[in-house]
């Protein structure tokens, strides 16, 4: 089968299209014939080498996310069968042969049904972004129905999913974006209010939006820029969940004291396996009930994986970048 493989760590050019043997599922494993694979920034860090959470043996086929059809099942698999439409979210699977390929084998717990209302392209846009969104909102942020959440960067791959999950759970959601086009997208996905984070003083609108009630949870994509202001907006016992950060900052920790505010870091790789599996079961249910429409961004053919890695860190694309493996 065709796959993107790297035999050394380095720049995007180490990603090569090659022919490799098809992986074979063993007990409690499943093989999926992939139509699309998701591309995540974390895969560029792994490709470069010395990523703190995951440093694979070489040669290595990248990719954790994808969507397609079950191709074969190993002994002990009963939940899925050949021909089922599925999405793959294999970042914490014990075995994962890589989704930048025509076929992938991984633990059955990392593969979930994809309803007919969700395209394979959209299925490939789940995986790491949707598990990050779910974990940030519910496992770290402890978001409850009726609370208010502020989602920075709500037009991105994680942000659009976090917004929809928050609304589905009964929360009030405020999203930020940087252009009129992106703001309209955030409105489309159900935000109760949308703010332009490129406008000076944009967070000053929060009190009027919330009737001076403030926010209970902040999903923070750029903590080095926003964290101090986030803490000022929080209600008593409010929570900030740091999903993204690109530098350091100097702020007064006293801001956490009067409100007994919590600041949580979040990394999908740290999720206990039971919480990770819980998030995937929950996401499958939300998909089946029509509460989630993943947003697809740039689409490139599998052989352009190196180009995808070059673009994903420099662009501010809306939605998730995917690789097309089977022509639709």
Image: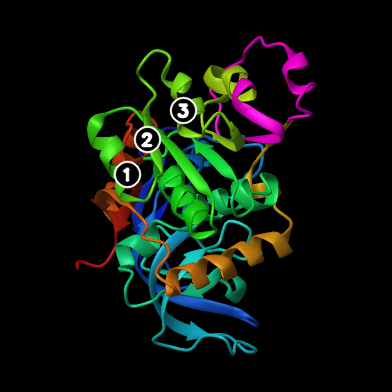
Residue under circle 2? Answer: 194
Give the answer, above or below, for where 29 lies relative to 247. below
Residue under circle 3? Answer: 208
For the residue pair 254 and 130, the one nearer the viewer reads as 254
In percent of width and height, residue 202 lies at: 41, 20
Nearer to us of marks 1 and 3 is 3
In percent of width and height, residue 76 lies at: 65, 89
* Lower position in the chain sequence, tag 1 or tag 3: 1
State yes or no: residue 292 in magenta. Answer: no
User: The magenta stretch spans which residues?
Assistant: 232-261
What separation in Å lies between label 2 and label 3 (alpha carbons)? Answer: 13 Å
The quadrant holding residue 307 is: top left
* Lower position in the chain sequence, tag 2 or tag 3: 2
Secondary element type, mark 3: helix
- Tag 1 and tag 2, C-beta contact below 8 Å: yes
What separation in Å lies between label 1 and label 3 (alpha carbons)? Answer: 18 Å
Q: Is residue 242 visible?
A: no
**Label 2: how many Cα within 10 Å (few below 14, some 14–19, many 20+):** many
Q: Is residue 83 visible?
A: yes
Query: In the figure, is residue 170 to the left or right of 17?
Result: right
**Quadrant for the C terminus in the image:** bottom left
Residue at 63%, 58% in the rendered image: 92
Residue under circle 1? Answer: 187
């Amino acid at each position: 089968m065709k796959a993107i493989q790297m035999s050394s760590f380095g720049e995007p050019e180490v990603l090569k299209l090659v022919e490799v043997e098809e992986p074979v599922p063993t007990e409690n494993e499943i093989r999926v014939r992939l139509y699309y694979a998701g591309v995540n920034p974390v895969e560029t860090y792994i490709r470069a080498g010395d990523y703190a959470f995951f440093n694979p043996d070489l040669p290595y086929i990248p990719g954790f996310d994808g969507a397609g059809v079950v191709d074969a099942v190993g002994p002990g698999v009963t939940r899925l069968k050949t021909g089922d439409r599925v999405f793959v979210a294999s970042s914490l699977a014990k075995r994962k042969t890589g989704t930048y390929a025509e076929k992938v084998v991984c633990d059955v717990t990392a593969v979930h049904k994809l309803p007919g209302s969700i395209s394979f392209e959209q299925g490939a846009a789940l995986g790491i972004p949707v598990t990050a969104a779910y974990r940030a909102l519910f496992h770290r942020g402890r978001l409850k129905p009726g609370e208010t959440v502020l989602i920075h960067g709500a037009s991105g791959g994680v942000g659009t999913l976090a917004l929809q999950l928050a609304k589905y759970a009964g929360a009030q959601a405020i999203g930020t974006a940087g252009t009129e086009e992106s703001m309209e997208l955030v409105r489309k996905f159900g935000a109760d209010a949308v703010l332009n984070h490129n406008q000076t003083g944009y967070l000053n609108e929060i009190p009027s939006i919330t009737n001076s009630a403030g926010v209970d949870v902040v999903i923070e994509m750029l903590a080095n820029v926003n964290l101090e202001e986030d803490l000022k907006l929080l209600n008593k016992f409010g929570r900030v969940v740091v999903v993204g950060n690109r530098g350091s900052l100097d702020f007064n920790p006293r801001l956490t004291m009067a409100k007994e505010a919590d600041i949580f870091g979040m990394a999908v790789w740290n999720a206990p396996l039971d919480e990770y599996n819980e998030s995937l079961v929950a996401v499958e249910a939300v998909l089946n009930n029509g509460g989630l429409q993943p947003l697809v961004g740039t689409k490139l053919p599998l052989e352009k994986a190196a180009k995808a890695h070059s673009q994903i860190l420099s662009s501010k694309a809306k939605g998730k970048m995917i690789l097309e493996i089977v022509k639709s």
